Image (cartoon, helix red, strand yellow):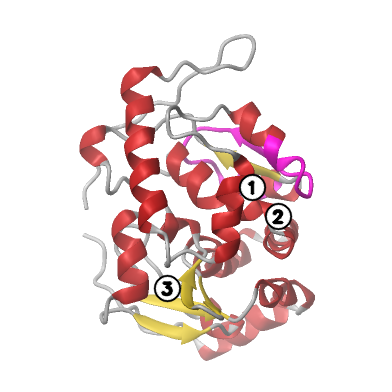
Amino acid sequence: MNKKHVYTSKKPDDTGYIDYGAVDDGTWKTLFERQTKHIIGRACPEFIAGIEELKFSSERIPQHKEVTAELSRHYGWGVEQVAALIPATEFFTLLSNKKFPAASFIRLPEELDYLMEPDIFHEFFGHCPLLTNKAYSNFMYEFGKIALAAKPKDRVQLFRLFWFTIEFGLIQTTQGLRAYGGGILSSFGETTYALESKIPMRKPFDPVDVLRTPFRIDILQPIYFVIQSYDQLFEIIDMDLMALLQKARELGDHPPMFEPKK
């Protein structure tokens, strides 16, 4: 999976409005209509409810201020326009202020299925719906504060908890196994792969196990961790994460389940 195009964020006008244009709005429409159909029976019920709460339209890319207005009614969250990739300190500072960073560009039509940078579809569609869920949004907020206070070396390993939950988490529901991670639910291919393929491993969520598990950002994930409820996420915050991190280091990382990046 090689990056084919370098993306540039779009600038808002003096009122905060961004004119994405017909091509970008058309890309949003294609992605939104395709994925809203594809996640039926695969996304957790809370995610589906969140999509409805945010009142997304398929006809155009939502404005950041519109998404913030809807999110603010649910536990005080909003979105902050940023460049695609930002430093870890800035990222966790935003989370600790209940602001989710979101880019202002969308992938090209020829790169619908994968791109290296997180675009606005990934951020808005993949992550924002569950910010209307109390336990999920509280976990995001508290994790941001903990990661921000951690030493840089500790922060890198703690990010594995974020990766295997917020980005690529699965949850066991009364209807069966469902996805809640934004990296899964914003990806047509990974939505099916994570839930239905026989290739990846699916393990019960254990924070020490997660902290010992390496990952790569540019592949379909070889392993997913399954929580039983969103309350389980918030229980992580009540644990002594630094003690868990130390235990994980004493045990050592699991062997990577992927080839080294070339």
Asked if marks 1 and 2 touch (Cβ < 8 Å), the reply is yes
Q: Nearer the viewer, residue 99 or 21?
A: 21
> Which SS class for mark 3?
loop
Q: Residues within 10 Å of mark 3 (few under 14, many from 20)?
A: some
Query: Does 79 lie within the magenta span?
Result: yes
The residue that disc 1 covers is 89
The residue that disc 2 covers is 148
Left or right: where does residue 196 sit relative to residue 74? left
Query: Which label's residue is closer to the chain start, 3 or 1?
Result: 1
Measured from the top left, where is residue 113 in percent x and y? 27, 48
Residue type marked 3: Pro
Which mark is on residue 214? 3
Measured from the top left, where is residue 23 in percent x and y? 31, 22
Which mark is on residue 41? none
Image position of 58 with respect to 98: above or below: above
Left or right: where does residue 199 sit relative to residue 185? left
Residue type marked 1: Thr
Q: CA distance from mark 3 to mark 1?
A: 21 Å
**Which residue is at 67% across, 58% downward?**
140
Q: CA distance from mark 3 to mark 2?
A: 21 Å
Residue type marked 2: Leu
Q: Residues within 10 Å of mark 2 (few under 14, many from 20)?
A: many
Magenta segment boundaries in residue numbering: 70-93
**Which residue is at 56% across, 48% downward?**
51
Query: Which label's residue is closer to the chain start, 3 or 2?
Result: 2
Measured from the top left, where is residue 39 in percent x and y? 41, 59
Measured from the top left, where is residue 216 in percent x and y? 36, 64
> Which SS class for mark 1?
helix
